[in-house]
Image: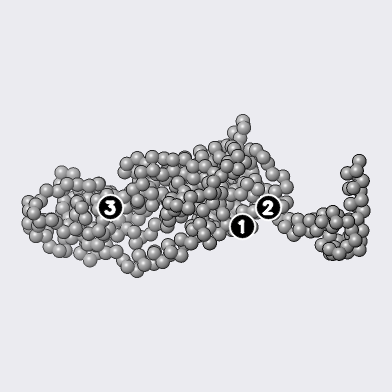
Amino acid sequence: MWNMVRCARAKGFMSRARRFTGGDCALSRGSLLPLWVRRRVFSVHREHSSACVSQSHTHVRTRPPWRILFFGTDHFAEESLKCLYSSRQESGEKVVDLLEVVTLPKDLPVRRFALQNSLYVHDWPNVNAHNRFDVGVVVSFGCLLKEDLIRHFPYGILNVHPSLLPRWRGPAPIFHTVLNGDAVSGVTIMQIKPRRFDVGPILNQCVYQIPENSTADQLGETLATMGAQLLIKTLKTLPESIANRREQSKCGATLAPKINTSMSWVQWEEQTCDEIGRLFRAIGSRIPLRTIWMGETIKLLDFAGKFSVTLSDQKKRPTPGSIYYQKESDTLLVCCKDGWVGFRAIMLKKSISAADFYNGYLHQFFLKKFSQQHKECLFQSNKLKSEDSAARQKNSQIAKMYSDTQ
């Protein structure tokens, strides 16, 4: 009864306040209204000033199915989108209710899948997320999301990242995992933070033992599937996962910048057989390895691994970059820092086999004693300093966005 009387009195005071002051926002702190009424009026004013945030959280769901806005671009992201879409189609206890997509205005795998399956597509950066979604999901998107956008989601925005954070923060974790020779990788589900990439709290992680000689493409396919499955698992218990989240460790953070063409130059004097093999498995499907032969750039294709070569003069170590054609395996062998690596094809103006390269270009040199090959017959290292310097400068600039500190 007292509560009803108090509410009636409050309504009367509020009405007086509006008549004499022109509304809530014009009410002065010196008003003769009771203190508890004045506090309520000013509270309404504060809430009104930030309506775009508070209203979006008015009807917060506490369990699935969720209303999800998905941000993504490539094939890795497409795998998570497929799982979310499948969950939306399920007849039982589904995880997804509403699903819409944000992607770049280009012909990308995520856009194609969304259009083929009649999902609404927002062209970045034109995103309408106000009061419509419970949680956002970002997978391989590449664009920094502003704090104003993140605030529209009651449960924040989750990120599926293909590494065990804080290891390999950045846009190319899979490539650097292979390039570094890591034996273990995995996927991380984290909440994103504004202004910085890959530094948010961790909700879930899954560890993966990498098979020997895995390529970046093979690892990417596996982690894409694992990440999609871990995302669904996390969404099933989203409030609990957020309540039990943990901050990333301050130790062990490494940066995984974008791969670039400067990485593809082979340094025969400096790189070992294993390092060249890892380089090929990391970037070879996208950027062919390169070297210099007779002043021209050639591309090294179809890496065949490490080989053993027995020379007639075993006392004299061959010069790094020396070439040897092994007929029985139809492989072109090249001497590097600690041994020989093989390639079954190369590209001059077009791709040719090792046998064709030997017969068409090298045979005249091999008519002479192997240990006395002409200098022109060597593959020469030629790392372009301008490319390398530009890449280092760019990586230095973006490193701050992956740092724990501002």
Query: Could you give the CA–CA distance between mark 3 and mark 2, rounded to whole angstroms?
Result: 50 Å
* Residue type, mark 2 in image: His
Is 119 left or right of 175, judged from the image as shown? Answer: right
Q: Name the residue under label 3.
A: 276
Query: Could you give the CA–CA distance between mark 1 and mark 3, rounded to whole angstroms?
Result: 42 Å
Q: Could you say where residue 260 lies in the image, as x and y percent from the top left?
A: 38, 59
Is 143 left or right of 45, judged from the image as shown? Answer: left
Circle 1 SS class: helix
Q: Mark 1 points at which residue?
A: 147
Q: Name the residue under label 2.
A: 130
* Residue type, mark 1 in image: Glu
On screen, 178 above or below 262?
above
Q: Residue at x 92, y 53 (%)?
A: 12
Q: Is residue 31 visible?
A: yes
In which quadrant of the rendered image does the N terminus lie? top right
Camera-side residue: 103 or 404? 404
View extreme (bottom): residue = 386
Q: Could you say where residue 259 lies in the image, as x and y percent from the top left?
A: 39, 57
Circle 3 SS class: helix
Label 3 neighbourhood size at 10 Å, few (<14), some (14-19), many (20+)?
Answer: many
Q: Which quadrant of the structure image shows residue 195?
A: bottom right
Q: Which residue is drawn at 17% across and 57% down?
A: 322
Q: Residue at x 29, y 64 (%)?
A: 383
Q: Is residue 171 visible?
A: no
Circle 2 SS class: loop
Q: Which residue is drawn at 71% across and 55% down?
A: 52
View extreme (front): residue = 35
Front tag of 2 and 1: 1
View extreme (top): residue = 92
Label 2 neighbourhood size at 10 Å, few (<14), some (14-19), many (20+)?
Answer: some
